[in-house]
Amino acid sequence: MNADLISIGDEILIGQVVDTNSVWIAKRLIEIGIDIRQMKSISDNPEQIVESIRQSTSDVIIITGGLGPTNDDLTKKTLTDYFNTELVFDAKVYEHVKTLLVGRGVIVNDLNKEQALLPKDAIILENKSGTASGMWFEKDNQHVISLPGVPFEMKGIITDEVIPRMLDILQLPSIVYKTVMTQGLPESMLAMKIKDWEDNLPNEIKLAYLPRPGIVRLRLTAKGSNKVVLNQLIEEQIEQLSQIIPNQIFGYDDVSIEKVVGDLLKERNLSVSTAESCTGGNISSLITSIAGSSAYYKGSVISYSNEIKESQLNVQATILEDKGAVSKEVVDQMAISVRKNFNTDYSISVSGIAGPDGGTEEKPVGTTWIAVANKEKVISKKFTFGEHRGRNITRASLSALNMLRLLLLNKL
């Protein structure tokens, strides 16, 4: 079963408003086994609304927008005419509209009353958060659902009305999703590493690569008739995958690496500090974005200049002169010093050339050294991330957290 998503509004077409509704709806539909065939935005024009419906061959069409009380909101009348029905007054909806508006200190007028005029042959979908009801039409086994464009109103109707009705009315397959979170290999290298495993996936399972800077998500989707069997298939494949890339998998289902690292530190009653140069405090920001991070995070030295590396982290001037700030020797000393100065169990240090300037033939833009340390050892590694400053900072931060994760798990 598939669906088309249509957003209505000139404000979307001119870039004044971003259509986040379609993305949100798509995620909800995919979760229950409905594939998205297309998303598109059209103007507040009756002909375009009708033509979009006529052209669609999907089982479900969800339309958002154009249900307000003003003259430019044409969706309700257009759909009423298209489905050859008429508008009738719904006293229950009108009472809801009045109660909602009076509670907000708004005087009810004739335009508000007209929102209780609804298509006779449509299923009316209650909008608990607003005055524009949703409408569900059916014709020739095609379901056309019209919803308000206000995001929080639309989400409420989807959650409370649309999804439950779909599960009850439509013939939907069982579907299971699992997302494997990886760090440490770019998409192309990861694909080569797991190629044999991917080629031998059961027919019921499809794999999608969802990359972003520093992270590649592997989404496994299983469809069939028995959810228990599908869950078992997914778990078996993930177990195989974990044997192939044990150091790259840091979690599942969109968990962040900073959350995973924080949980490991918290569970073991351990602490961490950071010494950052090229990342400029981004690692600390990620760590402290997690609620409860004060239980394990002590603080950081943002040693952007060599002067601070020397005075605050005891990096010798001769090392900086001979090896350069972006070197193994420097990050090793940074990690050792910040751990001792802050009296933490673990530490992270980073020094690199974020760009776009500052690179040399020996050390091009993107060259980054990262070290992690505990009382027993210091582990450092060189990375070459690329030319883009923002992505370099992101990749360095995530790589540093993954190195700490591996050290915590005794895998480094």
Image: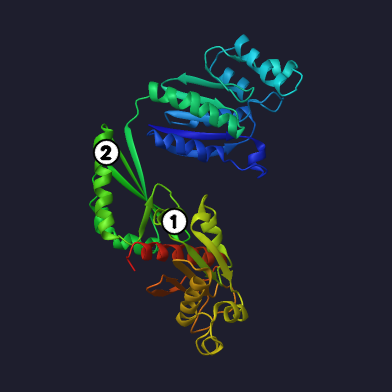
Quadrant of the snapshot with the N terminus: top left
Residue for badge 1: 257
Q: Is residue 200 left or right of residue 381?
A: left
Q: Position of residue 152 (x, y in %)?
A: 59, 32
Q: Amino acid at mark 1?
A: Ile
Nearest the eye: 131 or 293: 293
Report helix, strand or loop for mark 1: helix
Q: Amino acid at mark 2?
A: Leu
Marks 1, 2: nearer the viewer: 1
Could one spot residue 222 in this view of the protein? yes
In the picture shown, does residue 377 fall above or below 243? below
Q: Position of residue 379 (x, y in %)?
A: 39, 74
In the picture shown, does residue 360 fall above or below 173? below
Residue under the image location 50 percent in, 28 percent down: 158
Nearest the eye: 403 or 211: 403
Residue for badge 2: 230
Mark found first going from the N terminus, 1 or 2: 2
